[in-house]
């Protein structure tokens, strides 16, 4: 009996390793398209901002920067520092390129795809897990934003890692995933409340009590971020930290966009979900949620937990989500898993009996084709091409010792991170062209032209 059990466990482990490996490699290939594209596309300002910070880690070292995120304007304190630290390690290993910047989120999103398979296999079966992974890979959320050098892919991978450790009753994995998530982005702090709420809904009070040490750890880590900011800037509010959090949350009415209303927010979410995940996948998830409304507190509490992570983010950072469509990224696990379960459930209906074998494939094609035009537009976007070209030209035509003046000043408001990443020079921004400088760069943004003049 023991020998048979050992053979079964070994076989299961080998199957999971093989399928997980295939999904990971496939994800690297599919998401990794255009990995070396210049940072001039949609939301590519993330790449140059965190790329600049990562390069400064290499330039000055972790100890000299005190693990602070150094920008030309000072310390960036609005997020925990793990993302640019990981990018700096990639730079150290491979050099400073667009692809080495995107490598970190690419690996994280590929890990997310594997975690969806593992979680789906635990809650339902291997078929559901595989289909959930493939559904995720059919969305613009994974295929484009999954390689965007921003916090969402990285923190979501750690969230799923932590959740998987909790679900499998393996505390070390739960702890490691939790800590890594919380030192990556604020969303990392939402997995613990999500698990707690799911347990409360299921009236599992003993499990709720066992989470108390992790709550203490999370509060400590959250507090330490403010201590770290105080060490860096001399104030726990340094770097405009509090205002940034209030602005993202919309707690202050003055921080909200003028067009923000509750109904407007719901309508904006409808649009975001339709374009980021497809209307098809969103509707499949809503139908699954309705059909299993009595089981979300018990049988399907793991799926409920993943949905709660996204829901908490929508509530806490409503302002940010209202503005940035990619912040719906946290719903990728919930929609993929619930959508997969719903598709396989549809196979039981007589109307789909004759096509039951190909039904999952049909839905995969529908989800992909529905948003393929949007995905193509994202891949071809070049809204910040001028800033990239100016930065590249500055680097080619100047030296490290040159002081470069960019004019007009207003151009820097949206282009400074691009200019600094690609030029890697000391830049000043001013409308006063009589200031002290070695090289003057005059920018005509409306006509898409610029001129570099050496004094």
Image (cartoon, helix red, strand yellow):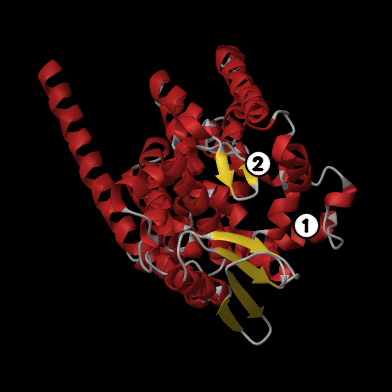
Instruction: Find residue 441 and report its horizontal and vertical position in percent.
Output: 60, 75
Residue 259 appears left or right of 109: right
Closer-to-camera residue (35/155):
35
Looking at the image, do the residues carrying marks 2 and 1 touch, with CB atoms under 8 Å apart?
no
Instruction: Find residue 249 and report its horizontal and vertical position in percent.
Output: 76, 44
- For disc 1, the marked residue is 265
Residue 410 appears left or right of 326: right
Closer-to-camera residue (418/197):
418
Secondary structure, mark 2, is: loop
The quarter of the image holding the C terminus is: bottom right
- For disc 2, the marked residue is 78
Q: Earlier in the sequence, mark 2 or mark 1?
A: 2
The numbered mark at residue 345 is: none
Q: CA distance from mark 2 to mark 1?
A: 24 Å
Tell me the residue at 44%/37% (across/down): 61
Q: Residues within 10 Å of mark 1 (few under 14, many from 20)?
A: some
């Amino acid at each position: 009996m023991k020998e048979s059990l050992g053979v079964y466990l070994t076989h299961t482990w080998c199957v999971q390793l093989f399928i997980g490996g295939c999904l990971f490699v496939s994800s690297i290939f599919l998401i990794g398209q255009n990995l070396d594209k210049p940072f001039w596309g949609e939301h590519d300002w993330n790449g140059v901002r965190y790329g600049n910070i990562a390069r400064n880690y290499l330039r000055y070292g972790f100890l000299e920067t005190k693990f602070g995120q150094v920008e030309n304007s000072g310390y960036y304190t609005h997020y925990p520092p793990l993302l640019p630290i990981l990018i700096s390690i990639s730079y150290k290993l491979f050099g400073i390129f667009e692809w080495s910047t995107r490598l970190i989120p690419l690996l994280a999103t590929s890990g997310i795809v594997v975690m969806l398979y593992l979680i789906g296999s635990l809650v339902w079966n291997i078929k559901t897990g595989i289909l959930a992974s493939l559904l995720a890979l059919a969305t613009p959320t994974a295929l484009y934003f999954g390689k965007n050098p921003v916090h969402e892919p990285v923190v979501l991978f750690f969230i799923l890692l932590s959740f998987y450790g909790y679900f499998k009753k393996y505390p070390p994995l739960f702890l490691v995933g939790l800590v890594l998530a919380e030192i990556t982005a604020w969303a990392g702090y939402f997995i613990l409340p999500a698990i707690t709420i799911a347990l409360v809904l299921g009236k599992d009070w003993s499990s709720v009590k066992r989470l108390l040490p992790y709550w203490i750890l999370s509060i400590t880590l959250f507090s330490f971020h403010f201590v770290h900011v105080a060490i860096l800037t001399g104030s726990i509010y340094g770097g405009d930290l509090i205002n940034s959090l209030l602005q993202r949350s919309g707690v202050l009415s003055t921080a909200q966009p003028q067009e923000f209303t509750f109904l407007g927010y719901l309508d904006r979410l409808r649009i975001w979900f339709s374009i980021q995940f497809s209307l098809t996948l969103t509707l499949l998830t809503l139908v699954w949620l309705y059909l299993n409304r009595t089981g979300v507190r018990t049988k399907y509490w793991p799926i409920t937990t993943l949905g709660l992570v996204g829901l908490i983010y929508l509530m806490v950072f409503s302002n940010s989500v209202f503005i940035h469509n990619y912040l719906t990224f946290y719903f990728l696990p919930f929609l993929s898993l619930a959508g997969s379960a719903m598709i396989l459930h549809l196979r039981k209906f007589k109307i789909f009996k004759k096509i039951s074998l190909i039904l999952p494939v049909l839905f995969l094609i529908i989800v992909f084709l529905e948003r393929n035009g949007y995905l193509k537009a994202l891949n071809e976007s070049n809204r910040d091409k001028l800033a990239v070209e100016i930065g590249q030209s500055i680097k080619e035509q100047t030296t490290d010792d040159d002081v470069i003046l960019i004019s007009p000043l207003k151009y820097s408001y949206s282009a400074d991170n691009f200019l600094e990443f690609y030029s890697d020079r000391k830049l000043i921004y001013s409308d006063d062209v009589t200031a002290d400088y070695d090289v003057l760069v005059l920018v005509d943004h409306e006509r898409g032209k610029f001129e570099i003049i050496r004094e």
